[in-house]
Structures are given as C-alpha cells and as structure tokens.
Image (spheres, rainbow, N blue to C red):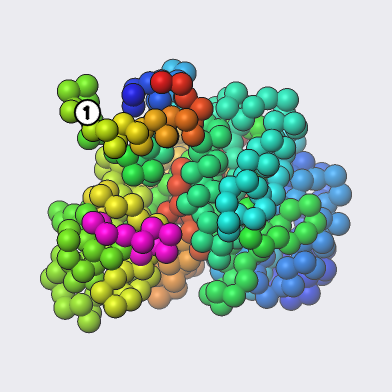
Amino acid sequence: MTITTAYSTHSDPQTAALEVADALARHQPGAVLYFASSQYDAAAIAAAMERAFPGAAVIGCTTAGEIVSGRMLKSSLVAMALPTDIVPEIHVQVARGIGTGVDGVDAAFKGFQAATGRSALDLDPREWVGLILIDGLSRAEERVMERVGALTDVMFIGGSAGDDLKFERTRVFAHGAAHGNAAVLALLRVPHGFDFIKTQSFCAMSKTLVPTRVDEANRTVLEFDGKPAAEAYAEALGLPVSEAAAHFMDHPVGLMDGREPYVRSPQQIAGNAMAFYCAVKAGMPLALLDSTDIVADTARALAEAKLAAGKVAGVINFNCILRTLELDAKGKSGEYGALFADVPTVGFSTYGEAMIGHINQTSTMLVFKGY
Amino acid sequence: MIDQIVAQRAKGNAMVEKTTLTKLLMKGFDPSKYNAQSPDDAARIAELQRIAAEFGVTL
C-alpha cells in the first residue's frame, strides 16, 4: 500500500470531509493526518473527519494555509492517509493545559507507556517517531518541547496550529474533538524507516548579538550586548532603528548549532526592546542571518533526502507562515508547491515549527522511506 | 558531566548523541564551550545537575 493524499476546497466541513474520505478511505488507512483552514468550524471538521475514517487514528490542526502534493492552498482541507504497512502502530494523546505547565505532557507520556508497555525512554528512536501539533496561540511551545525532549529520545517533529493570520483561535484535533490550550502528540512506529528535513533559507552573517537582558516568558529581548535591543540590532545591520522592523523577514537571528541555525524571528520593536516569535535565552550568542532562496534551498534539501532515502513514500511538511508570506510576496508559492508534486505530501503554514525545540522561519519535514 | 548526560541518554546511538547536545544548546547550555580543562563554575554545574535530573540521568 502507498501513502495517499487528498484535498477539498468545499466550504462545508461535512462535505469537505466526505470528499477527502472518498479519495482516501478505500485505502483503509491506519492513520489519517489532516490540516484544515480556520474557515471551517473546528468542532465540526474534527467530528466529520473522525466519522469519515472509522477505525483509524485521526489527528490534525487548524492552519494558516495548506500544502498538498504539488500545491499550496488556502481555505481548504488537506489530508494524508497512512497505510498500516508504513505505520503499523500509532498512539495518540492530548496534552492539556499547556499554557500553565507541563503536567499534561507528563500525562500524555504516561498514556504512551500504558499503550506501548514501555517507557518512552526505552523506545528505539530509529523505529519510532513522534508528531506534535500545538495550539499556536498558547505561547507554550518552548516548555512543551523541552519536556518532550526530557521524556524521550524519540524525535518529535511538528508545528504550531494557525488561524489564517487572524490570531484569535487555533485548534488541534484528536479523538473527534477540537482542543485549545493543548497539544496533540502521536507516537508512530515506522519499521521501514524515516528521515527528517530541517531547512531554513538563511546563512549566518559575521555579526553576533548576545542577549544580555531578556524577558524569556514574554519572548522579549531587552538588551543585546548591554545596549537597548532595538538599537543594537539596527546598529548591527547599519540601519536607523526606525528602519529595522522592515528587515525582520530577511534578517532574523539564529542560535547556531555548528553551522546549523535555529532561527528566532523578531516580531516587533516595543519601546527599545524586541519581541520575538520564540523565546531567547540570556547569554546565548545569536548570529545575525541573511536570507537566501527558499525554493532553491528546499529543492536541494528534498533532493538530498530523496538520495539518502532511496525511495520516498511520503512527506509531512510543517512550513512557517513567514516563509509562506515571503513566497506569496515573491510570486513563488506555485513553484514551491511544485517541488512536492512527485511525492505524496501534506502540510500546512504554521505559527512555529517543532524539532528538538520551538523554532521560526523554518520548514521541518518528516520523510517516510519507501520500500 | 556533559559527557555523562550525553552518554547515558544516547547509549551509543550517534543520532541521539547529536540531538541531546542540541537539546542542551536549546536550554541555554552550549556544550561546545566546555571541555575537561574548563574551570569549575558553581552556577553552571548546578544548572547541569538540574538538567541531568530532568533527563533522568544519574551523575
């Protein structure tokens, strides 16, 4: 059996779910992953998708745009059916109350232990992989990912749910319901293997900024190198502070792991401080980044993954909304979508990407190997 | 201490070694800045002990 994808642009959630089910249900998937525009009533789409795939584990979230094999869409429902030979075992948990702590994550992992009969620390990270979909307005991604990383060596990859840039309500879906202030965690056994792509279209410039005063809980840097953050950032770019915000998209900062940046994207200048889309730690040097070409970089990353995998059965793409906005602004969304035309792909434009931690302006992808 | 945390979590798995080092980096602790000759820093040692406990690692 093969991984298959489908989409619907019908505005009625029940009809959209049925259209997707018509295309996918005959494959009798063991798991279905779906991403739905916030135009759909969240509870209605969650219930409709659960009903459409009886017996399958059905998970998803709301989006800021959808991706399906070869296309980037808006206001749609996209879905991927995972057959039982690719994913013979999947366990789904909902971590609740993530806005105030990690007890929900701990409870989710107790659920995984009960389901697998093993501690998550004893699961082979070469055979098991995790998916994580987080309420994108919870501002809890850092603590959730840190806790997940402490509880298991299985790699969890995913993204933060969106709401088409309304920033009002994002939802994650599991067990036929829409959940807020929550994360959906899925543990998948993938015996034929998998790989990851983490791609961000930036290279490190020679300048580094060290956060010396931060308000980590509010994702805000008060000072870089002992100077007001906005002033130091603008100075590093050789710009007046008044022009700095116009360069956020092209010049975020990166926590460097060797040559690999973990991108932290500035959101706004507030007084002399800078708010970011993810938390920044005091004392950790951040390289100023310079943008490169998203389409070319993604094509290269996909080609490398295909070469390494031999045969790719499917891709799940968690692509930052800031990248989608850049692609839209440059008229390259079609070109980007077309990169995924020859492999079953599903994904969405996220409010943050998850891979080891919470990151920005990145695409994290799970690649299922074929056999 | 860093080596013990990584070794106990990775159990020889190179991918887990790498991700554990990255997890430390994301927590604000850059392993590449330290080696066996690094001077003891009580605050950093306490931080590593906290991380080890969180990771279920016995030092």
Location of the C terminus of chain A by quadrant is top right
Q: Is residue A37 left or right of residue A199?
A: right
Q: Is residue A263 visible?
A: yes
The x and y percentages for residue A200 are 37, 54
Chain bearing tag 1 is B
Using the image as rendered, state which of residue A312 and residue A174 is in the foreground: A174
The x and y percentages for residue A108 are 67, 42
Magenta residue check for A217: yes
Q: Please give the name of the residue rendered at 58% of the width and 58% of the height, measured from the top-left corner.
A: A99
Q: Is residue A21 left or right of residue B52?
A: right
The x and y percentages for residue A225 are 17, 58
| A289 shown above or below B16 | below
Mark 1: secondary structure: loop
Tell me the amino acid under the disc marked 1.
Answer: Asp
Using the image as rendered, state which of residue A21 and residue A200 is in the foreground: A200
Q: Is residue A365 left or right of residue A61?
A: left
Q: Please give the name of the residue rendered at 31% of the width and 60% of the height, measured from the top-left corner.
A: A214
| A223 shown above or below A83 | below
| A312 shown above or below A80 | above
Q: Please give the name of the residue rendered at 47% of the width and 24% of the height, measured from the top-left corner.
A: B57
Magenta stretch: helix, strand or loop mostly: strand
Farthest residue, direction bottom: A242
Q: Is residue A61 visible?
A: no
Q: Please give the name of the residue rendered at 58% of the width and 56% of the height, measured from the top-left corner.
A: A100
Farthest residue, direction front: B42
The residue at which mark 1 appears reads as: B40
Quarter-wise, where is residue A288 in the image? bottom left
| Other residues around mark 1 within 10 Å, as few (<14) / some (14–19) / many (≥20) | few
The x and y percentages for residue A360 are 41, 58
Magenta residue check for A252: no
Location of the N terminus of chain A by quadrant is top right
- For the magenta stretch, what is the residue range? A211-220
